[in-house]
């Protein structure tokens, strides 16, 4: 029992509710939302230290022991993600202060962000599959409002599709839960793991597992990403950055959690399937990124490539591959937020998203240009930066287990990714300067610090990979040995 | 029971594939009801007393699917309400409720 585990969920909910009461006081909104993310960060650091010394932490809500009550489980993997999510949200909120506009601020932008974070953290920390559904819904309802907030034409059109797709996938999620409950008679993840191991993972359970995979692929943008580029390029930059770096990663987290804890007995079927989906989404995402001449489109297609790459490492299901996935997941959350913010700033400055209409921005904005350069190298995995370490482990893992095609596609698509982001860099920053300080559509005043912070983070994650090595290894150990998870959560009542 | 669920899914899918906003939303709502019935059916349909201590019943019903159902209904209600409001706003701003006419605005 550890009460710290629930704090990342209730801190944003309570501050969000307090903020709703003081609607017109935007300064209070800003202060409280930053305070909430800082507190979540502190709590997750404390949890990381506790998990490192004392192992996984659990909280049984209402004192009902698992599997009867609802359990919250904080293992190293989940808490690392909570920490990175808090860091990313902090930066996106700072960015939003000077870019989101007064009207959106007054219409509950900051409380909605916090509710979204509550849903994200809840999905990371829950130990119960129905609770996972509920947290998903908390997150999605907040995102429905955020994506349509402001009510421009593009936003309304895209949010209609976004809501429809997500409602349908939620229904599929419920159907999968119902089937699973009918077969296993429990919804606690640890208990499910024990029961599936006892009963053996037969054909029907594998079919349900694939239904779950379909649901989470829809949310993560793994192969079923047709809704993603449209809806992620509709909302304002700060919101798109939060979506691109957090929402898809929650789907990825759910896939990794379910297929390492519950449905891990048939890797020849399920994990191969994940691998194929990952390969296809990497290829299609890279083709999309190369094909478009629009900053936002290129960046959203890069999200799809990132998701495919993370799950490629997981599909190999070896120590090295999963370690690569964890590194790459942490890296991807940071660098995708950074790319979205940088791309948004470029559009903010030039007033257009089309690559062919802008040129020579580096003369006016050297900091922006160099940060974009660093982000571009990092997203494609050039050595001293954070993408490299994940990429090398994922590739090594896929090669070790014989998935040469998967590793090969991963490497090839990273070249295409490099080409797509470098094309933005060359078109936007090089060449003849066609803007002057007077003809710019906006300023970068107030926008730079948050992007600089994320750039420093990606540098630090790359150079200091040795430092977080112990934590990532603990996370991988927890993922590949489900009996640690089940033993801690269930204690003595595993039957 | 499962036949009813099947019929509800079929109607819902048909409605979602149609063109107007309102039909699509009704379709999601009907599929939602189908899912709720499915959860109830999957928990097992049986007669029995409430699962309380002290009652002299030997057959208990499983109360967990009902709890799940309640949560699912609440969530479904909230998202449908939001969806309706959003589609009304979209109708007012975009001037159409036909999904096919949404494609490609001039101001992009």
Image (cartoon, coloured by chain):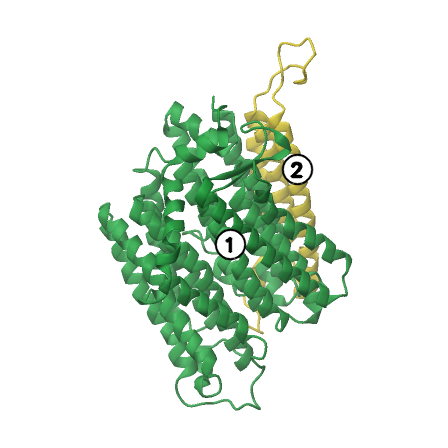
Chain colours: A green, B yellow
Name the side, left or right, on which A458 lies relative to A276: right
Q: Position of residue A461 (x, y in %)?
A: 40, 62
Q: Nearer the viewer, mark 2 or mark 1?
A: 1
Q: Residue at x 71, y 63 (%)?
A: A107
Q: Secondary structure at mark 1?
A: helix
Q: Position of residue A356 (x, y in %)?
A: 43, 81
Asked if the residue under mark 1 is in contact with the one under mark 2, i.e. CB atoms within 8 Å, the reply is: no
Q: Is residue A66 shown above or below A30?
A: above
Residue at numbered disc 2? B73
Regarding residue B73, the answer to whether it shows in the image is yes
Element class at badge 2: helix
- Which residue is painted at 54% across and 57% down in the image? A86
| Total number of numbered discs in the rendering | 2
Q: Nearer the viewer, residue A144 or A371?
A: A371
Residue with the mark numbered 1: A83
Say if A339 sits above or below A161 in the image: below
Q: Nearer the viewer, residue A171 or B96?
A: A171
Residue B19 seen in the current view? no
Q: Tell me the quarter of the image containing the C terminus of chain B.
A: bottom right
> How many other residues sit within 10 Å of disc 1, few (<14), some (14-19) or many (≥20)?
many
Q: Residue at x 52, y 65 (%)?
A: A233
In the displayed structure, A183 sits above or below A123; it is: above
Q: Is residue A321 left or right of residue B45?
A: left
Residue A292, given in percent of the width and then of the height, sits at 41, 70
The residue lying toward the viewer, choosing from A365 and A46, is A46
Output the chain of dot 2.
B
Q: Which mark is residue A478?
A: none
Coordinates of residue A61 in the picture (x, y in percent):
61, 35
Q: Provide the chain ID for the residue under circle 1.
A: A
Q: Quadrant of the N terminus of chain B?
A: top right
Rounded to the nearest whole Å, what is the CA distance between mark 2 and mark 1? 33 Å
């Amino acid at each position: 029992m550890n009460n710290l585990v629930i704090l990342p969920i209730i801190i944003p909910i309570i501050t969000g509710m307090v903020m709703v009461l003081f609607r017109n006081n935007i300064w209070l909104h800003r202060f409280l939302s930053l305070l909430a993310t800082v507190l979540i960060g502190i709590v997750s650091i404390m949890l990381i230290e506790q998990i490192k010394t004392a192992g996984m932490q659990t909280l049984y809500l209402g004192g009902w022991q698992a599997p009867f009550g609802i359990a919250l489980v904080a293992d190293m993997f989940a808490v690392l993600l909570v920490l990175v999510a808090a860091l990313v949200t902090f930066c996106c909120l700072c960015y939003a202060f000077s870019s989101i506009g007064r009207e959106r601020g007054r219409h509950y932008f900051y409380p909605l962000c916090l509710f979204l974070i509550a849903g994200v953290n809840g999905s990371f920390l829950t130990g119960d599959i129905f609770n996972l559904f509920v947290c998903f819904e908390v997150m999605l309802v907040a995102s429905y409002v955020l994506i349509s907030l402001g009510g421009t034409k593009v936003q309304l059109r895209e949010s209609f599709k976004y809501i429809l797709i997500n409602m349908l996938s939620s229904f599929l999620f419920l159907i999968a839960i119902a089937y699973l409950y009918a077969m296993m008679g429990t919804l606690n993840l640890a208990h499910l793991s024990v029961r599936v191991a006892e009963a053996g993972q037969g054909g029907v359970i594998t079919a349900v597992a694939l239904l779950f995979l379909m649901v989470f692929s829809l949310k993560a943008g793994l192969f079923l990403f047709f809704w993603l580029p449209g809806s992620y390029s509709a909302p304002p930059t700060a919101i798109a950055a939060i979506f691109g770096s957090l929402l898809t990663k929650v789907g990825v987290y759910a896939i990794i959690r379910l297929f390492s804890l519950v449905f891990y007995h048939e890797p020849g079927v399920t994990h191969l399937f994940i691998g194929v989906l990952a390969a296809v989404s990497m290829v299609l995402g890279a083709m999309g990124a190369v094909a478009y001449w629009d900053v936002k489109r290129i960046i959203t297609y890069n999200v799809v490539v990132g998701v495919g790459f993370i799950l490629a490492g997981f599909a190999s299901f070896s120590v090295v591959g999963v370690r690569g996935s964890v590194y790459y997941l942490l890296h991807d959350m940071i660098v995708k937020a950074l790319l979205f913010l940088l791309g948004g700033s470029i559009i903010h400055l030039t007033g257009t998203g089309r690559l062919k209409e802008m040129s020579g921005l580096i003369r006016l904005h050297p900091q922006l240009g160099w940060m974009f350069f660093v982000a571009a190298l990092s997203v494609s995995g050039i050595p001293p930066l954070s993408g490299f370490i994940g990429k090398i482990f994922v590739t090594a893992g896929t090669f070790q287990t014989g998935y040469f095609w998967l590793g090969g596609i991963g490497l090839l698509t990273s070249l295409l990714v490099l080409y797509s982001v470098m094309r933005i860099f060359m078109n936007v920053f090089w060449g003849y300067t066609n803007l002057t300080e007077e003809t710019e559509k906006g300023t970068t005043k107030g926008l730079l610090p948050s992007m600089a912070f994320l750039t420093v983070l990606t540098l630090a994650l790359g150079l200091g990979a040795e430092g977080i090595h112990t934590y990532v290894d603990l996370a991988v150990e927890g993922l590949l040995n489900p009996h640690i998870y089940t033993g801690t959560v269930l204690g003595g009542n595993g039957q | 029971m499962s036949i009813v669920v099947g019929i509800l899914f079929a109607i819902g899918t048909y409605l979602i594939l149609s063109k107007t906003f309102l039909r699509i939303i009704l379709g999601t709502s009907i599929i939602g009801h189908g899912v709720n019935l499915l959860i109830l059916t999957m928990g097992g349909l049986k007669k029995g007393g409430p699962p309380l201590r002290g009652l002299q019943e030997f057959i208990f019903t499983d109360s967990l699917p009902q709890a799940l159902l309640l949560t699912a209904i609440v969530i479904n209600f909230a998202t449908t309400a939001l969806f309706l409001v959003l589609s009304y706003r979209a109708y007012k701003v975009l001037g159409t409720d036909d999904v096919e006419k949404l494609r490609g605005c001039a101001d992009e």
